[in-house]
Amino acid sequence: MSSAQRLSGGRQEHGRQERGRASERRGRFAETKAILYLRCKLYRILARRMRNAAGEIDLIARSWNGVVCFVEVKARADAAKAAEALGHAQRGRIARAAALYLGAHPKLRHKVVRFDVLYVVPGRLPRHLKNAWQLD
């Protein structure tokens, strides 16, 4: 491998890392925007970026009427891309992570639970899709 090939490979790797960091920053900003939006709607944030053996849940909140909401935050350039961003496999991982979370928090086990999606698009208020999917 020539030194030019090694250098170009290094630049590609560096570019991927930069894109990854930028994506991480966008995601954190979108989650912060989602938290502010939910708080304005009288939700109590129980956890942010909760991780367990099954996966990660962006936000866990309790609505004003006591419903435990597992919220996936999607930040995209436009609403259509945001709506397409949540696949079946990801929903399954979130559901499994939610089950483990509820198992670890006995006080929440008997609460009504739902899965929400919050779409965050630049220059607009977040769009909150309540009860976005049901467990199969």
Image (cartoon, helix red, strand yellow):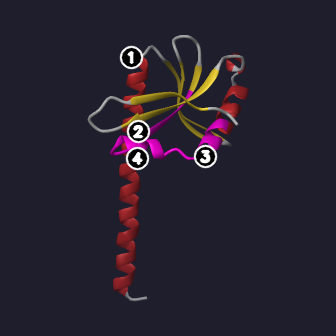
Q: Nearer the viewer, mark 4 or mark 1?
A: 4
Q: Indicate the amino acid at tag 3.
A: His
**Residue 79 visible in the current orientation:** yes
**Residue 55 visible in the current orientation:** no
C-alpha span from label 1 to label 3: 30 Å
Q: Is residue 47 magenta?
A: no
The residue to which callout 4 is attached is 81
| Residue in the image at 36% along x and 43% along y | 26
The magenta segment: 70-95
| Residue in the image at 35% along x and 64% along y | 15
- The mark nearer the N terminus, 2 or 1, is 2
The residue to which callout 3 is attached is 88
Q: Residues within 10 Å of mark 3 (few under 14, many from 20)?
A: few
Q: Nearer the viewer, residue 3 or 25?
A: 25
Residue 40 numbered mark, or none = 1
Q: Nearer the viewer, mark 1 or mark 3?
A: 3
The residue to which callout 2 is attached is 28
Q: Residue 93 in the image: state x and y as whole percent.
A: 64, 43
